[in-house]
Amino acid sequence: MADSGLSEQSEQPRRAWAHVVAVGIGAVVVGLLGWTAYLAATLPHHYNARNWDVMWVGFDIALSAVLAVAAWAAWFRRRVMVVTALVAGTLLLCDAWFDVLSSFGNSDAWLTLLTALAGEIPLAVFLFWLAHRILVRVVARVHHLSGAPGPPPRVRDVLALQAPVSPRGGGPR
């Protein structure tokens, strides 16, 4: 482990917390894979959905709200832009996925595909790139301010899930 100024004793609760989170997420993945297999085997190929209009309008309102927050964060150069860019990019990919798959066989399928390929997917990729770029700059700034020698670490090498440790050396608060 790189020298982070933390003793091995103070690092143990942080590592344990990260492991608890990782195991919890892993359990969700296993459960989701089982659920996905069940759905793949049991869902009908065709389904007439109720509230189709409410579902799509609600989704687009949520996407618009996240993009509005992203615009605000970009304008005022707020670091919350990282989160809003990731959420907006993910919602754009979901929107493209469901739009394209649900339009097959309809007369406007070409327009939906064009919108996904020329609009939603490129914007999502840009937002993911932007979030990464912001993280790179934040890591470089923190590295510089800490007085650490050498070049800043890659974003992927920066430790995460470092839960606060109580002053008496106890576990995560």
Image (cartoon, rainbow, N blue to C red):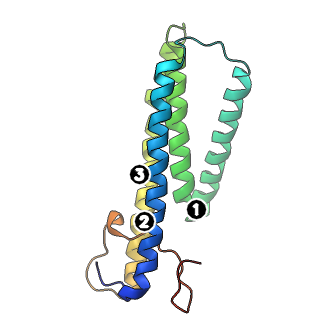
Q: Nearer the viewer, mark 2 or mark 1?
A: 2
Q: CA distance from mark 2 to mark 1?
A: 26 Å
Q: CA distance from mark 1 to mark 3?
A: 15 Å
Residue at 52 percent across and 19 percent down: it is 42
* Relative image position of residue 57 (x, y in whole percent): 70, 29
Dot 2 falls on a residue whose secondary structure is helix
Residue at 52 percent across and 80 percent down: it is 171
Residue ID for mark 3: 129
Residue ID for mark 2: 19
Name the residue nearer the viewer: 83 or 64.
83
Left or right: residue 61 compared with residue 167? right
Snapshot quadrant of residue 151: bottom left
Density class for disc 1 (Cα within 10 Å; few <14, some 14-19, many ≥20) is some
Dot 3 falls on a residue whose secondary structure is helix
Earlier residue among tags 3 and 2: 2
The three-letter code of the residue at mark 1 reads Val
Q: Residue furthest bottom?
A: 168
In the picture, the disc for residue 68 is none
**Can you say which quadrant of the picture contains the N terminus?**
bottom left
The three-letter code of the residue at mark 2 reads His
Left or right: residue 132 compared with residue 76? left
* Relative image position of residue 112 (x, y in whole percent): 52, 20
Residue ID for mark 1: 80
Q: Nearer the viewer, mark 3 or mark 2?
A: 2
The three-letter code of the residue at mark 3 reads Trp
